[in-house]
Amino acid sequence: MTPLLKVKNMTHFFGGLRAVYNYNLTLEKNRIQGLIGPNGAGKTTVFNLITGIFKPSKGSVKLDNEEIAGLFPYQIASKGLGRTFQNLLLWRHLTVFDHIKIAHYSQISYGLIGSFFGTKKRREEEAKIKENSYRLMEIFDISDFADMLAVNLPYGAQRRVEMARAMAIKPKALFLDEPTAGMTPEELIRMIQIIKNVQKKFNVAIFLIEHRLKFVMELCETIQTLVFGEVIAEGTPEQIQNNPQVIEAYLGKEDIS
């Protein structure tokens, strides 16, 4: 079967600095994979290259066998690749409901005429968007915050708002950049269950960056380890956990078991 996402020999330079070198990724449908590595390893740069924030200097990125390298982020999103960000990007003056509703923009087809004259098609589409927005808020356990400004929520809830917003585009693949950053242990446990539920309910492939190894080991079926822009190991959680290169380069000398 053709993989959902195939990255081949992706390399990127910032001026004379080589940030990512010969990066390869095969992301199958309905799977959860992880990317770990020390600070500055290039993990977020990999995300940015695949999702269109940067254009790779070299290499190929194919989503559903269609080349997407070089497209703008909104074009890549419209083709089914959603993402969250390491630093929360929420609008200061929008409610939780509005954040998720606005994210449906790519699915609107009623056009200017429908917008100005309130056609039947507009009313039907707006009703579906509203229904799906409330459904997503329920799935991500943020329904109680619907009318609150998103930036006023607890940090863990803000993370869930961002994930719900990403799911509003109905992605085939969801990229999560540090989804548990700043969370308490209780919020982390809740996030594990939410991600498992989302993957199962929507049949979406998930690729995530995370520093909390308990989170990665429990969720991911395969894991890559990135050091100085290069993958030094790839395998199951057990294989990564016991890989000498990973232990030395990222985890230190002690085993993490």
Image (cartoon, rainbow, N blue to C red):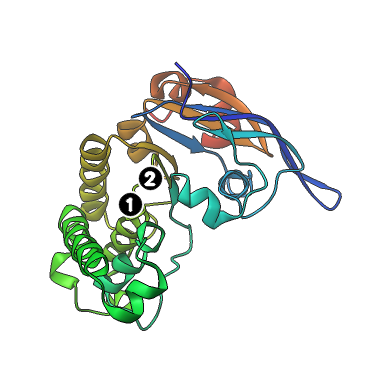
Query: x, y percentage for residue 112?
Result: 41, 74
Specify whether residue 176 is in view: no
Question: Observer-nearest residue: 48 or 99?
Answer: 99
Residue at image coords 36%, 53%? 169
Left or right of 247 in this view: 231: right
User: Could you tell me which secondary element the residue under label 1 belongs to?
Assistant: helix
Specify whether residue 67 is in view: yes
The label shown at residue 167 is 1
Residue at image coords 54%, 28%? 65
Residue type, label 2: Pro
Q: Which residue is mark 2?
A: 171
Query: x, y percentage for residue 82?
Result: 43, 49
User: Could you tell me which secondary element the residue under label 2 belongs to?
Assistant: loop
> Above or below — where is 255 with respect to 123?
above
**Residue found farthest to the right:** 16
> Above or below — where is 250 with respect to 82?
above
**Residue found farthest to the bottom:** 93
Label 2 to label 1: alpha-carbon separation: 6 Å
Left or right of 19 in this view: 161: left
Question: Observer-nearest residue: 205 or 103?
Answer: 103
Q: Residues within 10 Å of mark 1 (few under 14, many from 20)?
A: many
**Residue found farthest to the top:** 1
Residue type, label 1: Met
Query: x, y percentage for residue 165?
Result: 34, 60
Pointer 2 with pointer 1, Cβ within 8 A: yes
Quarter that holds the C terminus? top left
Question: Observer-nearest residue: 137 or 245?
Answer: 137
Give the quadrant of residue 126.
bottom left
